[in-house]
Image (spheres, rainbow, N blue to C red):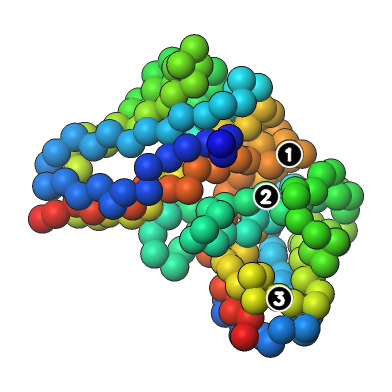
Amino acid sequence: QKEVEQDPGPLSVPEGAIVSLNCTYSNSAFQYFMWYRQYSRKGPELLMYTYSSGNKEDGRFTAQVDKSSKYISLFIRDSQPSDSATYLCAMSGASGGGADGLTFGKGTHLIIQP
Amino acid sequence: KAGVTQTPRYLIKTRGQQVTLSCSPISGHRSVSWYQQTPGQGLQFLFEYFSETQRNKGNFPGRFSGRQFSNSRSEMNVSTLELGDSALYLCASSLGPEETQYFGPGTRLLVL
């Protein structure tokens, strides 16, 4: 079993829909949780950064962390075609990754249909 | 402020050759991490450098090595290339080891 599980998709939704992306993990030492967005042939871009359990909102994006269930989510409201990309969850036991780096899910390919 | 830059962006090599990839971090960032991204394994941590010292290394063979210079720029080297080394190699920089990582565009390596 991989440390971080993420459905690769593709996930296709109509423009304006609410998108839910999820990851599960097995390592209880993970304390810091991130979501990155990666467009084709580009490097990952940090979207959200949260510590421990709880919710964090930034514009149309909401990140949720449930450490008791080892489950994290990213919600995108009012989805736009420009949101079409691969979304990667990442986590670590130390802030910013530390010396052990970040552990990533394989990414979910999201398609927003105009 | 300029982002992380990586050179070259694309590279084609043959089996048995070696390759050196370069990463220039965001100005003021002193920590550089390297990751390998493949369709099968996703993003995997290679190593991290801070103040010219390798702090840790992921589960990769000794053919993968790196270094960091006094200006925080970093290079990674892969010797005796194998077909399975074909991947996108990503560099990420941060202010320090405990800070948020920002990724460059990557170097796409194809081994024939």
Q: Quadrant of residue B62?
A: bottom right
Q: Is residue A112 left or right of residue A91?
A: left
Residue picked out by circle 1:
A100
| Image position, residue B92 (x, y; %) | 63, 53
Tag 1 secondary structure:
helix
Give the distance between the C-alpha atoms of the residues marked 2 and 1, in whole angstroms: 8 Å
| Image position, residue A83 (x, y; %) | 27, 50
Q: Quadrant of residue A103?
A: top right
Tag 3 secondary structure:
loop
* Number of the front mark, 3 or 1: 3
* Number of the front mark, 3 or 2: 3
Residue B82 numbered mark, or none: 3
Tag 2 secondary structure:
strand
Can you see residue B100? Answer: no
Can you see residue A17? Answer: yes
Amino acid on which the number 3 mark rests in the picture:
Glu
Query: Label 3: few (<14), some or many (≥20) within 10 Å?
Result: some
Amino acid on which the number 1 mark rests in the picture:
Asp
